Image: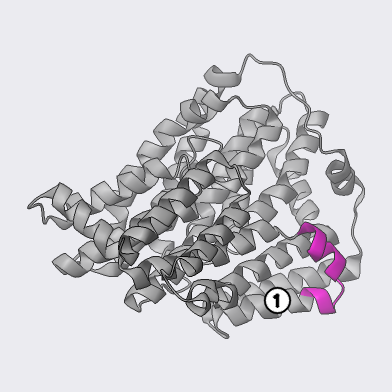
């Protein structure tokens, strides 16, 4: 059996394990990398090079900044301001929260941001009869997804895709490559969330009794943590400097994030012990192993083999728009059942192979597929932040009923806006 086929077999095993969750995601990723080495698909140094990749350091650094915001009380202050602005109106609170969390997720790790905001939702719903947890939690989580898809550091899929494109075709996205089409999709989401989506949520779960979130420790932190004023000021200064550097490219993206994270530790905005306990290490390891699997598949020629199979299935179709539409749809579909980073590992090598074959531009295909993976929300398996919303008491079918129309809007938006900003040929 050739290395290209063997690489695909290993990838297939990993996808099954990712889907069934028989092993933790990080463990499955490590297993896949190890099998690549033991079965001679690629070398140890190449497959495990993801652990030294700058993208992994970037992800961990943004998570640390999110932890520091919660520890200092900065996140809670922002949440209380939203409560005051909404004046007890659920739809207004939802709109303001979606805008605030969506824009924040452009620079902060999605899971960390949602972790900070879920206790705020719980506190608001406990104190106001006009607020319902299910009406708020899933839409706000989707806002974080759509907003986070608008910058390179917004969430894991962008970092994974950037690492794959860098390794496979020698191109990289900038901090703002996704911002144009991403913000257009975010605007579509906001319109959906406060109109059709809000009315739809009342029909789906509006008659069910409320479930109290089991978040007592976090809730007490939100209610009682007034924050050390000096640390609050320092935290907001660090946040402002970080965003300033992102916007004006004062430092490279990775160095900016690492400097911000280090400042959080040096100024005691968060402690190393808190980072060790609260950092989502599984996501960090998973990203590193995803990059390693991609490196192994690339070296073995597995991506080219998949590209040839897809190309054969498409026949003589050489239309960039048709191929783009098929790949984006494929990504959206499989991202509902396996993690979005895994979906990228499956689809992006195919896309790059077809782009090389037909002479299409790599960047728009990468951006479109990345956006598709980033906005999948029809099942709780789609992304970590969607899984986290289950604390509000959603049923499995609720995600499909709420998310199918949003996914359709996102799909059509990608087909329109990505080629508008980045021509396919």
Q: Residue at x 29, y 59 (%)?
A: 350
Q: Label 1 neighbourhood size at 10 Å, few (<14), some (14-19), many (20+)? A: many
Q: Is residue 190 left or right of residue 352?
A: right
> The N terminus appears in which quarter of the rendering?
bottom left
Identified at 72% across, 42% down, the residue is 118
Query: Is 258 left or right of 38, judged from the image as shown?
Result: right
Q: Where's residue 144, x and y in %?
A: 57, 49
Disc 1 secondary structure class: helix
Report the front residue among 285 and 422.
285
Residue drawn at (53%, 18%) of the image: 203
What is the count of numbered marks? 1
Above or below, 383 against 152 in this view is above
Principal secondary structure, stretch drawn in magenta: helix
Outermost residue toward the bottom?
250
Q: Estimate the x, y position of residue 422 in percent, counting from the top left.
A: 28, 65
- Whether residue 399 appears in magenta in the rendering, the answer is no
In the picture, which quadrant includes the C terminus?
A: bottom left
Left or right relative to 266: residue 86:
left
The residue to which callout 1 is attached is 260
Task: Compare residues 356 and 374 and report the one nearer the observer.
Answer: 356
Name the spot of residue 76 as percent of width and height, x first.
79, 52
Most distant residue in the left direction: 316
Specify whether residue 14 is in view.
yes
Q: Up-down: is 223 above or below 392?
A: below
Could you say which is closer to the camera, residue 209 or residue 289? Answer: 289
Q: Nearer the viewer, residue 64 or 38?
A: 38
* Residues in magenta, as a range: 264-278
Residue 276 belongs to magenta span:
yes
């Amino acid at each position: 059996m050739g290395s290209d086929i063997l690489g695909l077999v290993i990838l297939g095993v990993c996808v099954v394990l990712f889907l069934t969750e028989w092993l933790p995601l990080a463990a499955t990723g490590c297993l896949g990398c190890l099998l690549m080495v033991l079965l001679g698909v690629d070398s140890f140094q190449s497959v495990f090079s993801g652990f030294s990749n700058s993208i992994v350091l970037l992800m961990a650094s943004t998570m640390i900044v999110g932890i520091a915001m919660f520890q200092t009380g900065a996140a809670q202050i922002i949440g209380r301001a939203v409560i005051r602005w909404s004046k007890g109106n659920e739809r207004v609170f939802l709109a303001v929260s979606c805008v605030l969390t969506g824009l924040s997720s452009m620079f902060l790790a999605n899971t960390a941001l949602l972790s900070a905001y879920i206790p705020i939702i719980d506190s608001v719903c406990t104190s106001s009869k006009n607020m319902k947890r299910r009406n708020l939690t899933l839409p706000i989580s989707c806002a974080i997804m759509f907003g986070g898809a608008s910058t390179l550091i917004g969430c894991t899929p962008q970092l994974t895709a950037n690492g794959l494109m860098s390794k496979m075709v020698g191109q990289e996205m900038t901090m703002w490559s996704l911002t144009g089409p991403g913000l257009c999709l975010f605007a579509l989401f906001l319109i959906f969330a406060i109109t059709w989506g809000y009315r739809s949520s009342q029909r789906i779960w509006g008659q069910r009794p409320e479930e109290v979130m089991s978040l007592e420790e976090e809730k007490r932190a939100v209610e009682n943590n007034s924050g050390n004023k000096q640390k609050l000021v320092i935290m907001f200064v660090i946040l402002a400097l970080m965003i300033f550097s992102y916007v004006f490219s004062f430092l490279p993206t990775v160095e900016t994030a690492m400097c911000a994270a280090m400042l959080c530790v040096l100024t005691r905005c968060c402690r190393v012990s808190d980072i060790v306990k609260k950092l989502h290490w599984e996501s960090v390891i998973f990203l590193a192993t995803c990059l390693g699997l991609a490196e192994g598949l690339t070296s073995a020629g597995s991506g080219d083999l998949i590209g040839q199979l897809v190309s054969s299935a498409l026949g003589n179709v050489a239309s960039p728009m048709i191929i783009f539409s098929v790949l984006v749809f494929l990504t959206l579909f499989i991202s509902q059942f396996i993690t979005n980073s895994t979906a990228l590992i499956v689809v992006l090598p195919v896309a790059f192979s077809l782009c090389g074959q037909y002479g299409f531009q790599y960047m728009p295909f990468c951006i479109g597929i990345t956006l598709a993976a980033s906005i999948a929300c029809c099942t709780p398996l789609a992304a970590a932040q969607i899984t986290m919303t289950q604390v509000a008491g959603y049923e499995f079918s609720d995600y499909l009923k709420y998310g199918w129309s949003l996914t359709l809007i996102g799909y059509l938006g990608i087909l329109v806006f990505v080629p508008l900003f980045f021509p396919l040929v």
